[in-house]
Image (cartoon, coloured by chain):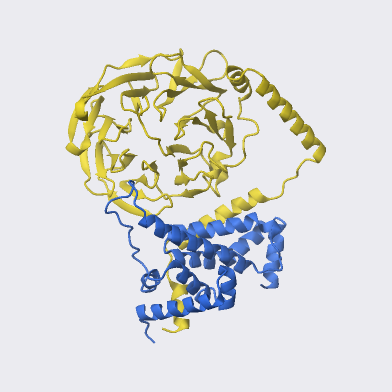
Chain colours: A yellow, B blue
């Protein structure tokens, strides 16, 4: 082989998806270029005045009683988006990695804000350590790496939904039509678990056994040991349930519906040979509240709930509350005029991501004291490069990675 | 670098999207191809080429128009591709509880003898071969780009070419 022949081979080697890659690259580069264009900055004197004003405001806040007063101020001001939101996603406040579902597919977002579109998938979920993503596209379930490298795919007989990776890392549950199935993490051993309600994604038992909670076709909550294809317990689900969330230690399970939250204690028999569902009891919520979302903290101490409220003749409001499942008083964390649509806990349980589509912002709200609220704007366009005008607000599919469960 | 490219860079620095698009069209194919031939992963190659262009856009206002654009871009691409290859090798060797037992990456159905043969070379050697025989840099230029002694570049080139000759049979 001559050097000319090698040159020809190097020049002619086909690259999979080269034309699409070139197009995507041009969109991204064009967008970055537009963002880099010079802006007219104010002259020094106004900047100094603004800086002094900000310093004075910060001093006022620091010297005033913390907590409720600040939250009230926040509540009064934030009606059309947090002012001075950060204009670009350059880091994830609180760290970790996000999995974001856009119209074009899921994006893996690194802690430094860099992101990668993983492919043409409709739904996706992290593996427990964030090394892989399980993704659904029409009748296919795939495992891919966060850089988009495919590992395997399996075909289903019906549309695939709600992939959920087990905390052990060795199983993936998913729904194919009305069937709930579980497959090993290497793509083998695909087995039927039972019939499933299309409204409720399954939820793995957090302590790591291959136990799965789901709502079946008869609207019962079922706890199944998937490796043995055995039902451990079942009970009538609460009315119109749309979601399930376990406490970190697996001793509590909430059923989420628009009408309310129901909490069950879960008893584990010796050697974890069986789980028993306790009776559901309704968690008290403010009157006339509609539940948008709820989730146990990764630390298991509190439940975050997002409520829509229409308290009077004024505009609708959204509020994020922290609820003590032991019955302590609820704490109002944040509220806005308008609609917050999603919440997600940070992996360490110290922050909540609240989605505010009307303001095109994500809010990173501290669940504990000591941190400041951060808002990041222009979210829709970030996940629709080259198509910013038609961009829809993306959905948070996961915030990786969960901390070690079991502290209450 | 020709006068035309200098003009495009100047216009892009002044805010011309058309000039940027022309620069992109001129340099993307080689940058993407070079990355792909080093990393052997279409997604990673796209990422690397995108990153290089984003770095170029970010530094455009500071770019010295007397310097050629291509080598500057290629240097970023090749170094990132080598880094990716090293990381990938480490990652595949590292045991992790999240590793998928028995799972293997799908092999590409397209392509001929070149990619399997290149795959037998370490990323650093692939990079030298690509810089010399795809992008047509001299060994001296490659040595400066990769911050290697020229003798190392020459020996990597010679060994790489010998190995490829052994692995690829070409008629003619």
Q: Is residue A112 above or below residue A277?
A: below
- Residue at 49% from the left image edge and 60% from the top image edge: B83
Q: Answer with left or right where residue A408 lies relative to residue A227.
A: right
Q: How many marks?
A: 0
Whole-percent x, y for residue A317 in the image: 53, 21
Q: Is residue A13 above or below residue A346?
A: below
Residue ranking furthest to the bottom: B172
Whole-percent x, y for residue B94 in the image: 37, 54
Whole-percent x, y for residue A192 in the image: 21, 39
Q: Is residue A79 above or below residue A116?
A: above
- Residue at 67% from the left image edge and 20% from the top image edge: A63
- Residue at 30% from the left image edge and 51% from the top image edge: A153
Instruction: Please state which of residues B115 and A215 is positioned toward the viewer in this rendering.
Output: B115
Q: Is residue A106 visible?
A: yes
- Where residue A301 sits, quadrant-wise, is top left
Instruction: Please state which of residues B17 and B57 is positioned toward the viewer in this rendering.
Output: B57
On the rendered image, what quadrant is the C terminus of chain A found in? top left
Residue ranking furthest to the right: A45
Q: Is residue A238 visible?
A: no
Q: Is residue B143 above or below residue A373?
A: below
Whole-percent x, y for residue A74 in the image: 61, 23
On the rendered image, what quadrant is the N terminus of chain A found in? bottom left
- Residue at 31% from the left image edge and 48% from the top image edge: A140
Q: Answer with left or right where residue A207 lies relative to residue A113.
A: left
Q: Answer with left or right where residue A274 lies relative to residue B79.
A: left
Instruction: Please state which of residues B90 and A344 is positioned toward the viewer in this rendering.
Output: B90
- Where residue B93 sits, quadrant-wise, is bottom left
């Amino acid at each position: 082989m001559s050097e000319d022949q090698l040159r020809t081979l190097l020049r002619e080697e086909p690259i999979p998806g080269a034309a699409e890659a070139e197009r995507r690259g041009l969109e991204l580069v064009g967008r970055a270029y537009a963002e880099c264009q010079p802006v007219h900055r104010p002259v020094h004197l106004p900047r100094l005045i603004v800086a002094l004003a900000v310093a004075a405001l910060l001093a006022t806040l620091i010297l005033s009683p913390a907590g409720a007063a600040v939250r009230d101020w926040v509540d009064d001001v934030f009606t059309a988006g947090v002012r001075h939101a950060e204009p670009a996603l350059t880091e994830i406040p609180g760290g970790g990695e996000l999995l974001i579902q856009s119209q074009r597919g899921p994006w893996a977002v690194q802690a430094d804000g860099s992101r990668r579109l993983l492919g043409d998938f409709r739904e996706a979920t992290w593996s427990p350590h964030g090394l892989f993503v399980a993704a659904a596209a029409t009748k296919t379930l795939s495992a891919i790496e966060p850089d988009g490298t495919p590992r395997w795919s399996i075909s289903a007989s019906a549309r695939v939904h709600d992939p959920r990776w087990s905390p052990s890392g060795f199983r993936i549950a998913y729904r194919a039509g009305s069937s709930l199935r579980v497959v090993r993490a290497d793509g083998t051993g695909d087995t039927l678990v039972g019939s499933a309600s299309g409204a409720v994604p399954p939820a793995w038992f957090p302590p790591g056994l291959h136990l799965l909670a789901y709502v079946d076709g008869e609207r019962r909550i079922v706890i199944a040991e998937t490796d043995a294809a055995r039902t451990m317990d079942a009970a009538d689900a609460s009315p119109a349930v749309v979601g399930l969330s376990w406490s970190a230690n697996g001793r509590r399970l909430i059923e989420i519906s628009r009408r309310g939250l129901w909490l069950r204690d879960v008893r584990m028999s010796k050697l974890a040979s069986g789980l028993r569902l306790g009776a559901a009891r309704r968690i008290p919520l403010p009157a006339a509240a509609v539940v948008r979302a709820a989730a146990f903290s990764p630390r298991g101490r509190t439940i975050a709930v997002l409520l829509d409220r229409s308290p009077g003749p004024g505009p609708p409001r959204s509020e994020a509350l922290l609820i003590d499942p032991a019955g302590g008083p609820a704490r109002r964390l944040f509220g806005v005029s308008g609609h917050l649509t999603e919440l997600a806990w940070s992996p360490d349980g110290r922050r909540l991501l609240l989605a505010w589509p009307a303001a095109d912002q994500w809010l990173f709200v501290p669940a504990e004291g000591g941190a400041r609220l951060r808002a990041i704007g222009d979210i829709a366009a970030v996940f629709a490069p080259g198509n910013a005008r038609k961009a829809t607000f993306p959905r948070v599919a996961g915030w990786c990675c969960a901390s070690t469960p079991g502290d209450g | 670098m020709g006068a035309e490219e200098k003009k495009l860079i100047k216009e892009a620095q002044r805010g011309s999207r058309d000039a940027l698009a022309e620069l992109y069209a001129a340099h993307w194919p080689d940058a993407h191809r070079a990355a792909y031939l080093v990393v052997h992963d279409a997604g990673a190659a796209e990422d690397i080429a995108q990153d290089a262009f984003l770095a170029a856009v970010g530094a455009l206002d500071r770019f010295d128009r007397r310097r050629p654009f291509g080598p500057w871009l290629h240097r970023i691409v090749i170094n990132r591709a080598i880094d990716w290859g090293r990381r990938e090798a480490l990652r595949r060797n590292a045991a992790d509880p999240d590793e998928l037992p028995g799972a293997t990456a799908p092999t590409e159905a397209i392509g001929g003898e070149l990619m399997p043969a290149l795959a037998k070379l370490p990323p650093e050697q692939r990079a030298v071969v690509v810089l010399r025989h795809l992008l047509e840099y001299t060994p001296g230029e490659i040595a400066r780009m990769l911050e290697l002694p020229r003798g190392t570049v020459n020996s990597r080139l010679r060994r790489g070419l010998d190995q490829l000759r052994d692995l690829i049979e070409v008629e003619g």
